[in-house]
Image (cartoon, rainbow, N blue to C red):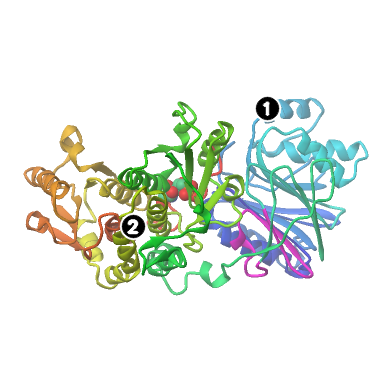
């Protein structure tokens, strides 16, 4: 979703810092971009479409451009109010061009504010909700307020969610605030930065200050302050982020997605480090110390929801009643809770609005909350009672890959911690071998050949039972999101209750079957059903059940514990989706219409 970058104290480099910050924010998803620099007056450049359009426009200004000055803000917009266009791109200015503002989120009362401002003679250039902000600031300035007073007065009139940053023609400061949308400060000796996400300024500083809702930041060359709504100075701690700029680069891979798929062995090792004792077969996670939930409700969206389905199932197997809910549905019909209920929000970004809203609903009902997230300092981690970090490292590709694997492992840690009596030793042993087994798959996968064979299919189906049901859903989500081809995932047993009508010789069915026993046997029965309809079958298997006898192609995975096998099977499906998308020439890291971090409900 929209991305904000701001920088003060870099003088002649301000514009370059902003453009490079916007590059780093591209992964969040956007359809227009712009910058504003303050230098006596405010100079703005903004363009619909890719960042390249903005960069060309900036370059066309050449040496005579007035896009210079010590303070500047930039923005990538993901349309909500009004289509992508130059006019709707941010920054937005007031009538006099004295203040420029960038905004993430939604201003819910903008209609009425805009009507008042129009009545008062203001002229609007865009269809956006955001443009009311600079005009509100302008009104307050006209009444004699200082820039900071005017900014606060404007913000006081807003309802909704926002991260806002503003520059003023006659000031060298950037003013910013947040309410329900992420904003983090980066601080260095002679410069200060702000952004929606750390990678935007990680090249310049790893020292960060996380803003909380209702706080205001003032950034100047060499100094920064954070105050509350009443203007009282707050003591904020400066944290060091562990990610480095190299981790957010493509490092020779064609796409971030492929790099992140290949980072999985390392990500999984980090997720496990210091949390499992291989000798005793026990799990010891600081974040879960003393936790004794009687029941667990997971809330999550997209890929994280698939991890939640896995988590709920593995907890039930460990004797703990557990359910997974789509976060966007949780509040519409909230399930009963008791004193011993734990609500777990699984969210890579820690900023997904639907998940945050479900977690807040849970908090309002007085139950304990746990964030399972990848991002230190994220809203979910700050609002929940506990946080279990999955430690996957930065994920830039819009398609979640390594974070799903780490979420599944973290769910295993959670269920081993909460299990009444443990079979944790088996799982711990399997987890120890998991990073090496993922590496084996990466080194030997035939996913590219399978992708070549089926790339022009009419659609793709994915089936799996038990722990492989979430894998089937995730395989389909990955396929549809980056290839733009139709793909559906089902619990294997459901296929014959309707979807089978869509199965033809042009629709390959990926069947995930591992181990032996009833689940495998029944899934093989489902494989035979699709085979009888001439559909090509791709078996993702450890070979134990011999499902490959009925398959047209096989993607092998090593044998492991049933609660660990989903990670291995999913790696093969990630690779198939990647190679199909690559052969179709799709925009793999930034699929159309999608955003990495979905900060509106
Ligand atoms: O950051 P979150 O894990 O909360 O994000 C949830 C979904 O938006 C996300 O998983 C989405 O489905 C991905 N694009 C899937 O690849």
For label 1, the SS is helix
**Residue shown at 81% from the left, 29% from the top:** 121
Q: Is residue 204 magenta?
A: yes
**Residue shown at 47% from the left, 45% from the top:** 292
Q: Position of residue 256 (x, y in %)?
A: 44, 64
Task: Count every numbered label the image shows and give the total.
Answer: 2
Q: Which residue is mark 2?
A: 424
> What segment carries the magenta color?
184-206
Side (left or right) of 541 relative to 427:
left
Q: Is residue 306 above or below residue 357?
A: below
Q: Position of residue 6 (x, y in %)?
A: 71, 57
- Label 2 CA crowd tier, 10 Å (few <14, some 14–19, many 20+): many
Side (left or right) of 43 relative to 148:
left
Q: Is residue 271 magenta?
A: no
- Choose the circle earlier in sequence order: 1 or 2: 1
Quadrant of the rendered image containing residue 530 = top left
Q: Which residue is mark 1?
A: 111
Q: Position of residue 47 (x, y in %)?
A: 61, 51
Q: Is mark 2 within 8 Å of ligand 1?
A: no
Q: Position of residue 385 (x, y in %)?
A: 58, 46
Q: Is residue 595 visible?
A: no
């Amino acid at each position: 979703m929209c991305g904000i970058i701001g920088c003060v104290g870099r003088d002649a480099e301000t514009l370059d810092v902003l453009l490079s910050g916007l590059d780093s924010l591209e992964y969040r998803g956007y359809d227009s971009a712009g910058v504003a620099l303050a230098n006596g007056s405010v100079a703005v450049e903004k363009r619909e479409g890719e960042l390249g359009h903005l960069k060309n426009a900036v370059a066309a200004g050449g040496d005579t451009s007035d896009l210079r000055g010590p303070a500047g803000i930039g923005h990538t917009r993901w349309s909500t109010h009004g289509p992508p266009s130059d006019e709707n791109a941010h920054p937005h200015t007031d009538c006099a061009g004295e203040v420029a503002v960038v905004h993430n989120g939604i201003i819910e009362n903008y209609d009425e504010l805009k009507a008042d401002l129009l009545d008062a003679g203001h002229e609007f250039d865009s269809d956006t909700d955001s443009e009311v902000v600079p005009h509100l600031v302008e009104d307050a300035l006209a009444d004699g307020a200082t820039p900071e007073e005017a900014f606060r007065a404007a913000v006081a009139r807003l309802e909704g969610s926002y991260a806002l940053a503003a520059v003023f023609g006659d000031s060298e400061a950037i003013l910013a605030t947040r309410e329900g949308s992420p904003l983090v400060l980066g601080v260095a000796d002679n410069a200060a930065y702000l952004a929606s996400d750390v990678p935007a300024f990680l090249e310049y500083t790893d020292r960060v200050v996380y803003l909380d809702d209702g706080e205001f930041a003032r950034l100047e060359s060499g100094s920064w302050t954070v105050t509350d709504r009443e203007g009282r100075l707050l003591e904020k701690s400066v944290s060091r982020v562990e990610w480095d700029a190299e981790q957010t680069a493509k490092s020779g891979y064609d796409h971030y997605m492929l790099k992140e798929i290949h980072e999985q062995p390392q990500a999984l090792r980090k997720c496990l480090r210091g949390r499992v004792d291989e000798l005793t077969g026990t799990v010891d996670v600081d974040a879960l110390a003393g936790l004794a939930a009687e029941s667990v409700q997971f809330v999550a969206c997209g890929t994280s929801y698939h991890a939640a389905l896995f988590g709920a199932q593995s907890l039930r197997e460990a004797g703990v009643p557990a359910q997974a809910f789509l976060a966007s549905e949780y509040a519409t019909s909230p399930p009963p809770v008791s004193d011993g209920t734990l609500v777990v929000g699984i969210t890579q970004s820690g900023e997904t609005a639907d998940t945050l809203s479900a977690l807040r609903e849970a908090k309002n009902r007085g139950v304990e909350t746990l964030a399972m997230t990848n991002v230190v300092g994220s809203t979910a981690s700050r609002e929940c009672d506990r946080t279990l970090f999955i430690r996957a490292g930065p994920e830039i590709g819009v398609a979640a890959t390594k974070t799903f694997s780490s979420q599944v492992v973290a769910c295993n840690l959670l269920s081993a911690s909460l299990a009444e009596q443990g079979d944790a030793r088996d799982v711990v042993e399997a987890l120890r071998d998991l990073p090496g087994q993922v590496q084996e798959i990466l080194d030997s996968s035939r996913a590219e050949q399978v992708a070549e064979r089926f790339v022009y299919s009419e659609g793709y189906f994915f089936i799996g039972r038990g722990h492989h049901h979430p894998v089937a859903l995730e395989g389909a989500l990955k396929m549809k999101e980056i290839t733009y081809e139709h793909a559906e995932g089902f619990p294997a047993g459901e296929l014959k209750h309707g979807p089978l009508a869509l199965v033809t010789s042009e629709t390959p069915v990926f069947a995930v079957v591992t181990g032996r026993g009833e689940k495998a046997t029944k899934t093989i029965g489902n494989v035979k059903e699709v085979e009888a309809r001439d559909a090509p079958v791709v078996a993702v298997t450890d070979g134990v059940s011999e499902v490959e006898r009925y398959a047209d192609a096989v993607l092998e995975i090593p044998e492991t514990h049933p609660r660990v096998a989903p990670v291995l099977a999913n790696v093969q499906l990630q690779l198939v989706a990647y190679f199909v998308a690559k052969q179709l020439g799709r925009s793999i890291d930034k699929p159309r219409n999608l955003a990495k971090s979905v900060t509106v409900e």
